[in-house]
Image (cartoon, rainbow, N blue to C red):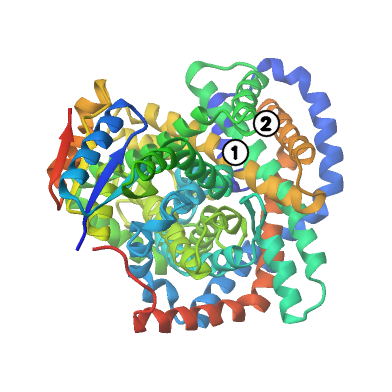
Amino acid sequence: MKNLAKLGAGSALTALVGSPALAQEAMSLDQKVNEAFAAVTGPFVNFIFMSFPGTNFPWIVMWLVIAATVFTLYFGFVQFRFFKHAIQLVKGDYSDPNDAGEVSHFQALATALSGTVGLGNIAGVAVAVGIGGPGATFWMILAGLLGMASKFTECTLGVKYRNEYADGTVSGGPMYYISKGFKELGLPGGKFLAVLFSIFCILGALGGGNMFQANQAHAQISGIVGDYPGWITGIIFAGVVFAVIVGGIKSIANVTEKVVPIMGILYVGAALIILLVNYDKIGWAFGQIFDGAFTGLGVAGGMVGALIQGFKRAAFSNEAGVGSAAIAHSAVRTKEPITEGFVSLLEPLIDTVVICTMTALVITISQQLIIDPETGNYMLNEAGSSIATVGGTSGVALTSAAFASGISWFPYVLAIAVILFAFSTMISWSYYGLKAWTYLFGEGKGSELTFKIIFCVFIVIGAAASLGPVIDFSDAAIFAMAVVNIFCLYFLMKLVRKELMSYGSRLRSGEIKRFAK
Amino acid sequence: MSAKLLIGLDGAASGSRALSYGKRMATLIGDCEILVAYVIEWSPYSFQTAEENAQRHKRREEELKLANERVVNPAVKALQDEGFKASGIVRHGHVAEVLNDLAVEKGAEQIIVGRSSEGGFAKRLFGSATSNLVMHASVPVTVIG
């Protein structure tokens, strides 16, 4: 997802581009802004990304993984028990034909996915595998499977406690279920926590969901066409986003919303082709993944190093527990909120277990990671921080090189995919931020327009400057959303269990009608 | 037992021709009910932005209202004024699929539709709604030229 700056892929991308001589002069002002900003936000950023003493394991990752485990156990492995039912719901088997024309389960899932599938699946995984070795993939898949239960919990609540207005539009998300749910349970502080979540959500939307995306898209474009000022990319992106979210130019959104899934399919397809061509090495690659998961195969930190990288990548990529997906899913008009929960549990599966794993497999199979022929372990680079790679690549460049070893022209497709993913992530987060904004400042044309304009301005800022601390801060804000959201989910999960029990028994008794022939 | 005819309208001239043929058939049959249907082309598998999703219910209501006001209600009223037993329905989905489902659901003897009003590339690629209906229908279909 968005946390690449933290993961180091950001610097890898920047390294691809090279530092422009012109930027040196402008740096002084940027640096001043950065320093002032870092001084103010530093303690908050450090707190969110603080590691457990004596390790480099950020507690926020543990927070997300523990929550996912708790929800998995509390709901009795809902992600496996209702997996088939989730697929049936997406296929529309349980959709009443009289409701045709409303948002379908498939559409809600696709919209939420376009917000999470992005640069993290391409570059972030390369960073994880580059540092943690192929073994990180195992832990990533495990965390992805557990994360399905977190998504289930938050998205069920998102639909159950959304606001429906007289004109037929809806608003939903953690801020609504926190305030309404706490009130229902007679707990204090719901309103305060909802406001806190909204503030973090706005900051996260402007940062990780916007500036970081613009920044990385610019790095990609200038990596291909040569270096040029970032504000040009920023203005173009801001103009297109403005046209979509303010001008309501649906055609642009429609095009991207169609192209993005195609890109996703193309990406997985290309990965599959590479795997098929190297079918004789698939067994070996899985061997590396399992061996690496428990021994580390020589990576820095051994097994724990692989585990940290895998967990981190899964948590950062699928946003399970962050609360963003609950906003996207709440638009579905269904009589049974829990059906949307079932559908949403497919998200971490597609994002992490399928797409991220494809990237990891291609990198492993392409043998970009250098193995010491004597020991069979991976060789570390000179700094000893990550695995040595052919050509010394890391981040998105490593993914690119791995794909290029199978399909020589694929890096161009990859570059286009990165840009489109960045764009669709921005559109999604503009909506998440907007919903948090209207929760705080009220719905209405003026209030909405204010936020949308602010959002577009931040695209230009994000593309133009190398705002390390700002991006650190906005990443921290996204994970701060998870702190508030998960804290509240622990109180609210019994409401979801009630729904699950009731729905489960009605499904078995046949009261929940199946419409498909 | 009265017979039922399902007439698919498309808001264009071919739909009106289907309607006049339906009237003639109903007169010949005698005890006959005419069901007028208009299908708003829609797919549950299209891709939308989060904002479009949030407004979807409102848009759907508007689409239904418009289709009823402009196409279905005038047709039903005209039929009733001429003494036919008639009712109307508007639904979202794929035209051929929905018309067939409606015919089965309502127990219609046959479906009457106008010749395809679509043209060009899309028709070549995907076939028209009418030809799809003819190929997949579970009840007899009459196509009016």
The chain ID associated with circle 1 is A
Given the image, on which type of amino acid does mark 1 rest?
Met
Q: Is residue A17 left or right of residue A84?
A: right
Q: Nearer the viewer, residue B35 or B131?
A: B35
**Which quarter of the figure has residue A458?**
top right
The C terminus of chain A appears in which quarter of the rendering?
bottom left
Marks 1 and 2 sit apart, C-alpha to C-alpha, by 9 Å
The chain ID associated with circle 2 is A
Q: Which residue is mark 2?
A: A459
Q: Residue at x 23, y 42 (%)?
A: A273
Q: Nearer the viewer, residue A63 or B13?
A: B13
Disc nearer the start of the sequence (1/2):
1
Q: Position of residue A29 (x, y in %)?
A: 83, 25
Q: Is residue B7 left or right of residue A72?
A: left
Which circle marks residue A233 in the picture?
Answer: none
Q: Residue at x 23, y 29 (%)?
A: B116
**Is disc 1 in contact with disc 2, using a CB cutoff of under 8 Å?**
yes
Residue B98 sits above or below residue A421 on the image: below
Q: Is residue A386 left or right of residue A63?
A: left
Q: Position of residue A333 (x, y in %)?
A: 52, 58
Residue B20 sits above or below residue B37 on the image: above
**Which quarter of the figure has residue A162?**
bottom right
Q: Is residue B63 visible?
A: yes
Q: Nearer the viewer, residue A506 or A413?
A: A506
Q: Which residue is mark 1?
A: A426
Crowd around label 2: few <14 · some 14–19 · many ≥20 (10 Å) = many
Residue A195 sits above or below residue B78 on the image: below
Crowd around label 1: few <14 · some 14–19 · many ≥20 (10 Å) = many
Q: Position of residue A384 (x, y in %)?
A: 53, 50
